[in-house]
Image: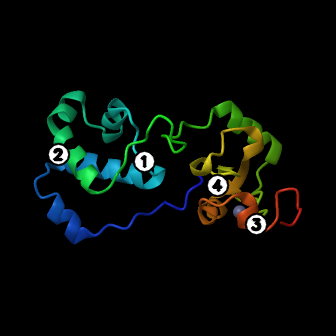
Amino acid sequence: MSSNRAWMPLHIENYLADTGHLTAAEHGAYMLLIMSYWREGCLPSDEKLIQRMSRLSKEEWAESRDVILDLLGRAGAKRATSKATTQFRPAIPMELKRQVRARDGEKCRYCGRTEGPFDIDHDMPWSRGGKHELRNLLVACASCNRSKGALTAAEFMGFDLEGHSI
Ligand SMILES: [Zn+2]
């Protein structure tokens, strides 16, 4: 995932003060949802998807949804609107990943290192409207992918992937 959001700050004192009324299962569900919100910038508009992301059963969700949605609302976690470009990101199809790997080989397109693990990275990040398309995807080492964050390849490198300076 093209993201510099691999870690999330947590104010332990405030968290515990806000969530003293939650059960252990609700803590788990709430934590999964705020981590997802942190990474994606929004939660899905479809509550069924939120329920699945929380890993609570439908019955548990029905029981806990009010308290969890209320906390998410207070934490400022917004739901995606159907028109937002930051909708919940679908996975990159396996076949497309295979094509990217076949084109780029086992080599980071940014730093040239040949030792993995490698990620499939977006040139124009998904959060900025980049698509899952062969021309927008490339092989990157985990370290470059993390440092690149929400930059485009050109912004990150100072030149585009064909070597033209910008
Ligand atoms: Zn690299």
Question: In this view of the protein, which residue sits in the foreground, 80 or 3?
Answer: 80
Dividing the image into four equal quarters, which quarter contains ligand 1?
Answer: bottom right
- Residue behind mark 2: 67
Q: In the shown orientation, is residue 109 left or right of residue 15?
A: right
Residue 156 higher or lower than 100, as above or below: below
Q: Which residue is mark 4?
A: 117
Chain-order first, disc 4 or disc 1: 1
Q: Quadrant of residue 63?
A: top left
Describe the element under mark 3 as helix, strand or loop: helix
Say what amino acid the circle numbered 4 marks. Pro
Describe residue 61's horizontal placement relative to residue 52 as left or right: left
Amino acid under label 3? Met
In the image, which disc is placed on residue 162? none
Name the spot of residue 107 as percent of width and height, x first: 77, 55
Which residue is labeled 3 in the image?
157
Residue drawn at (80%, 48%) of the image: 104
Q: CA distance from mark 2 to mark 1?
A: 18 Å
Q: Marks 4/3: CA distance?
A: 20 Å
* Closer mark to the observer between disc 4 and disc 3: 3
The mark lying in front, picked from 3 and 1, is 1
Of the residues tagged 4 and 1, which is closer to the observer?
Answer: 1
Amino acid type, label 2: Val
Q: Residue 125 in the image: x percent, y percent?
A: 63, 51
Q: Earlier in the sequence, mark 4 or mark 3?
A: 4
Whether the residue under disc 4 has CB within 8 Å of ligand 1: no
Quarter of image, res 67: top left
The residue that disc 1 covers is 42
* Cβ atoms under marks 3 and 1 closer than 8 Å: no
| C-alpha span from label 3 to label 1 | 28 Å
**Which residue type carries mark 1?**
Cys
Spatial CA span between label 4 and label 2: 40 Å
